[in-house]
């Protein structure tokens, strides 16, 4: 932490800052410039509360030196985290595709979609049963009945299941039913929920909040990691900006930035990041070209009858085309879309928790 | 809902849209322009899922006509909602000031602050015991012990208590301890929590998310209202923009906009909306000048020793000055800062739930 | 400038940075932390190009210490800049109100407005004759004919004239016709134009760009100041954010922030910052409550016939009410709306250029 | 244009709106809903000023139906605009790469870069001689001397030249020296300059403003097109958001959105859109994967000695690698990076103005 003094700071004010640095168990390095003095607080600044210095007389501002996250950082763990989701390895050289409907709506809808995405080459099935909806009057999800349908779909296709958890109380039921717990964008800073999924030890797909910086996304991951759960997948799903031509703005920069800052797998959700099925395939290609480790895509057999997110869902035949195109781009950047999993007729259920990496 | 067709839409495509409108139980009004046809779907569009039309062939876009919230709207209830918080009326002509530390840190800190803000003219005491912190390594709040201190402070000062609830499980304990349940900005779209505080029937202070539109704030209020709880206070606390000179950008426009769109009380939090104590008083004045019904302000006896938000907390003597200045501005706009409540030496405890308005 | 090294920077890399610091004529202060080394470059960093250090091997990032503007800063000039605009002092204790139509549209429209705002208590008349319009098909302004009308209005009312300059070629004509050259938001970083109005020596009203930071606004002012023109008025006119309830978001924080960072007068434009006449008066009050030195407000006798910005223009009778309310708020914060200027029947023409302050 | 009335609008208010629609030469279609009446104004709404309706009593809001641009739209011209820049075709199936230094700094620097990018496979040379700099104290460009160096570089390499024009006065000199006039992001809404380059008839590379919507970018292009110049290349170069991990946020969605809305060529500038050389190649790949027609990339032989934008410039050897990777991605999406132009030893000078498409 560097404490930058005002140009008119007095000697006494500078000394008071130095004392406070020492009182926090840090060493103080003083650098007297022509205009100002800058005081470096040397030691592990992560545990020190920054604001106590901001308020001291004569202080202009405080600049952190260390990054606030640790377990999530590449400095802490240089090699990529690679871990399997019911047999599908994520974070490694192969690109993984998760697909399925926004919401589970009926047995027919789900099974039809599950078989279609499986056939098209998807590696996991998504489907929401607890839905965070902006309006209290909108469809709120099928709940437990939906979970049963997801398990049936897994049994039929062998595809692992990704589904969103909205409340701590849902965690025991969810961990016994689905393979990956999704934390939705609106809950990215629901710290109680992050804490709880951290303790669950179950794989987590953490979506970036639509107002969250990359650093805040990594801090949210740190919540999960610091409670003992190393299997966290980060997901860029578009941020909110002034642009209204698309529902959100895909922050494609976040892909190489995250791959540099963290060892965790990074995937992209072109359905939410554009909000328009018409742009999903182009942005899916761009994600893989930029270095994403996977995609999560909304697919619905009849988007115009969907109860949520119809406008951004692909029909199965368009998803086939997306996989085909993404496969070519993956090869162009020296990777491969993971080969389809052989169907597991018995339904393998949940994998035993392997340690990350 | 108006469905705007593409310039090249065929007759058949137009007819398909009309049929779908009718299938949804709405009437269809057709308006043929020189370039395009526009189809009006007449009826209560709130229950209709918009995306099903977006996807029909030949459709360019869909424009909603009705607002998506109802109970929160002034069209539904033209007169202001006024309700008491343990004896302090909010939403009426008098301006209400809530003040206190960001976090409850110790008995001494809390009681010292409570007496100071009471003396300065505050009408309610704020103080967090469950803290949503960006970092898992930061102070997470005193929990139940802090609630006991808040109740002691209420007993000594008679000030009603405002404190943040982060998890559904905390609600029973919180409703029996504090007078207003605060929903923090990061939980504004934690719909499960909104649902639960709606059912609690307890007064709610709902903070705008830092990337939430005014409409989304009203939809979040609609969640609480639609579960039977009419006592919701809306709070502008700054939004996230590209500007970095202050931690957030105070959206002062939101004050007159909200006062026009809704009957609910609207207050402003200049501590979070600026993130810098130095600007708090100026922005507090501006809020009341713009028509806010109240303020919530962070005050700490020793900001440089605070465990959270020290940089934006006022010292008690500066808070005295804030109340003084705000009082003058309130009078200039034809209102009054509510007179201080007489101390209630016996500690009045919680009020009986009066019906709103 | 502090150069923060990576945790894995080698000794040789650190030495290379130190050498480069010295080669730039600065002194190097080395601070070795537990994790990293930080190198302070001591001297006037304003003239040094930061990126040359970013790129050296082993460098993590570079943090500027000095502010990039100088002439505009309060550190350079602690006392407020106060200067007269054709007899009206701006930047001092009195609040100044500039009002008039968005565009000059006709003799009748302009003169009717000019007399109305004069009577209501305005101190200067605004009116555009060169209009920056998003669409090439929109009304582009009356040009020189409009300037003649503005001069006639000044002669009749004695009000000084504020009008926007869009091109360098217009400057000679404009400086001989109007009292203040306005630089519009979309030209805030038209550096050639800033340079030219700087050399003109004529008073400048510089509007903040809709996506410009406070620091960039001050850098734009620095362009004008550094070319010898000290009479610059800064104008907050709303920034672009994700919120669509209003056309722009009034950054009310910018008022106390600017008053702290610079000695230049700061005014606010509630017409553009809201884009809706319905909110203009509330936001005008908030601006003065927050410490603004003045307002610029759009007024039109028949807003529904205006050729531009009708939706945000006040009718004269509403403007009368705005002045009345702002007057009360100004007094509540210990200031005064400047008394109306006595009409100057002869038309005083342009003032002689006084030196600032 | 649809005029949406308030729920409480009176019959008389509705009639007044209808009359005003007719007075504007449009037909009125009335659609009476359960809650509200909506009035459609049928005819070419592009020439009608929307705000005049917003202000009529009883009106809630006005929704435009037609897009505000015409010449730039695909509806107006369905097939792609393809035109040559001194022999290099842009907008067709082949991907075009423009590269060079941010600023022309010296003969050695420019020629070294020009030969390097030529050899690596670039099709045009960029280099600024008039530089829009945030600070008046920064290097402002070499001016005419720089133009001479650019012409020398073209003579030696045969590469057409792209360079930024900042002022109308520079246009005659620039059109006789360079092949493409660049309009920088900060001048995207400098309408006088757009008008002037429109009249010049010279090819224009129009950069999106960092605060401009896609629609505003197309309106800026419309300025150029409507003054008779059909050769406009659009360039996404990153927008300003709340994210600070990169200098700007690459709006990758804008690529497929623009390709859908307009027939004009669309390129992307990964150097500015990231602000960090480290991310340039990944984002360049993503741009081509998303469907961009070309790239403009900053290359400098010694980035750590550059006078501007060093931090985002690639060294020549890294640019070779970028071209190599982009080539593979182009093929994966069914396109090709254009083959390198044979060196033109005589220096071909400016091409004769061919008509677009």
Image (cartoon, coloured by chain):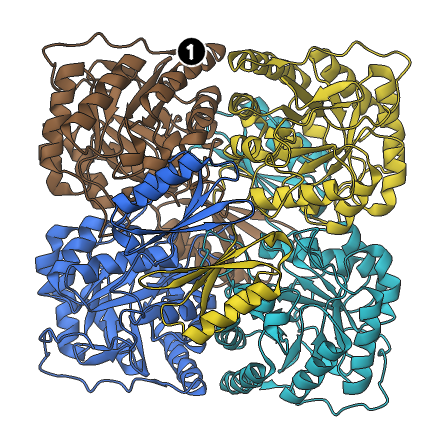
Chain colours: A yellow, B cyan, C blue, D brown
Q: Is residue D67 visible?
A: no
Badge 1: residue crowd in 10 Å (few <14, some 14–19, many ≥20): some
Q: Is residue B184 left or right of residue D19?
A: right
- In this view, the residue in front, B141 or C22, is C22
Total numbered badges shown on the rendered structure: 1
Q: Is residue B175 left or right of residue B252?
A: right
Q: Residue at x 31, y 60 (%)?
A: C218
Q: Position of residue A139 (x, y in %)?
A: 77, 41
Q: Is residue B1 visible?
A: yes
Residue C285 image-quadrant placement:
bottom left
Q: Quadrant of the C terminus of chain C?
A: bottom left
Q: Secondary structure at mark 1?
A: loop
Q: Is residue A135 left or right of residue A33?
A: right
Q: Is residue A310 above or below residue B120?
A: above
Q: Is residue C53 above or below residue D150?
A: below
Q: Position of residue C150 (x, y in %)?
A: 16, 67
Residue C251 image-quadrant placement:
bottom left
- In this view, the residue in front, C45 or D35, is C45
Q: Chain of mark 1?
A: D
Residue D165 image-quadrant placement:
top left
Q: Residue at x 19, y 9 (%)?
A: D343
Q: Is residue D72 above or below residue B44?
A: above
Q: Position of residue C191 (x, y in %)?
A: 22, 50
Which residue does the numbered mark 1 point to in the structure image?
D335
Q: Position of residue B189 (x, y in %)?
A: 70, 51
Q: Residue at x 36, y 64 (%)?
A: A36
Q: Is residue A108 left or right of residue A183?
A: right
Q: Residue at x 24, y 74 (%)?
A: C124
- In this view, the residue in front, C83 or A213, is A213
């Amino acid at each position: 932490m560097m404490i930058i003094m005002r140009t008119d700071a007095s000697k006494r004010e500078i000394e008071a800052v130095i004392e406070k640095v020492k009182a926090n168990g840090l060493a103080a390095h003083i650098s007297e410039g022509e205009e100002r003095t800058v005081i470096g607080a040397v030691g592990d600044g992560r545990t020190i509360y920054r604001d106590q210095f901001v308020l001291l007389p004569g202080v202009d501002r405080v600049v952190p030196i260390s990054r606030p996250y640790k377990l999530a950082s590449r400095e802490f763990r240089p090699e990529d985290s690679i871990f399997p989701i019911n047999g599908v390895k994520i974070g490694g050289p192969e690109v993984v595709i998760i697909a399925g409907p926004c919401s589970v709506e009926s047995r027919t809808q789900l099974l039809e979609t599950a078989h279609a995405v499986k056939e098209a080459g998807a590696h996991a099935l998504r489907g929401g049963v607890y839905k965070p909806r902006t309006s209290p009057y909108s469809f709120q999800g099928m709940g437990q009945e939906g979970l049963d349908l997801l398990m049936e779909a897994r049994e039929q296709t062998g595809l692992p299941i990704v589904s969103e958890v909205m409340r701590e109380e849902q965690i025991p039921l969810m961990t016994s039913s689905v393979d990956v717990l999704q934390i939705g964008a609106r809950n990215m800073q629901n710290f109680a929920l992050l804490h709880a999924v951290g303790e669950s030890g179950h794989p987590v797909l953490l979506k970036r909040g639509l107002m969250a910086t990359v650093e805040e996304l990594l801090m949210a991951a740190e919540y999960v990691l610091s409670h003992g759960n190393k299997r966290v997948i980060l997901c860029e799903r578009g941020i909110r900006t002034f642009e209204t031509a698309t529902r959100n703005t895909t922050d494609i920069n976040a892909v190489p930035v995250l791959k540099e800052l963290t060892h965790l797998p990074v995937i992209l959700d072109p359905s939410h990041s554009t909000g328009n099925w018409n742009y999903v395939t182009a942005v899916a290609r761009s994600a893989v070209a930029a270095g994403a480790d996977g995609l999560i895509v909304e697919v619905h057999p009849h988007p115009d009858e969907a109860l949520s997110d119809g406008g951004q869902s692909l029909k199965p035949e368009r998803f086939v085309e997306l996989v085909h195109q993404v496969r070519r781009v993956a090869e162009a950047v020296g990777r491969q879309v993971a080969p389809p999993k052989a169907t597991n007729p018995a339904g393998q259920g949940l994998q035993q928790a392997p340690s990350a990496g």
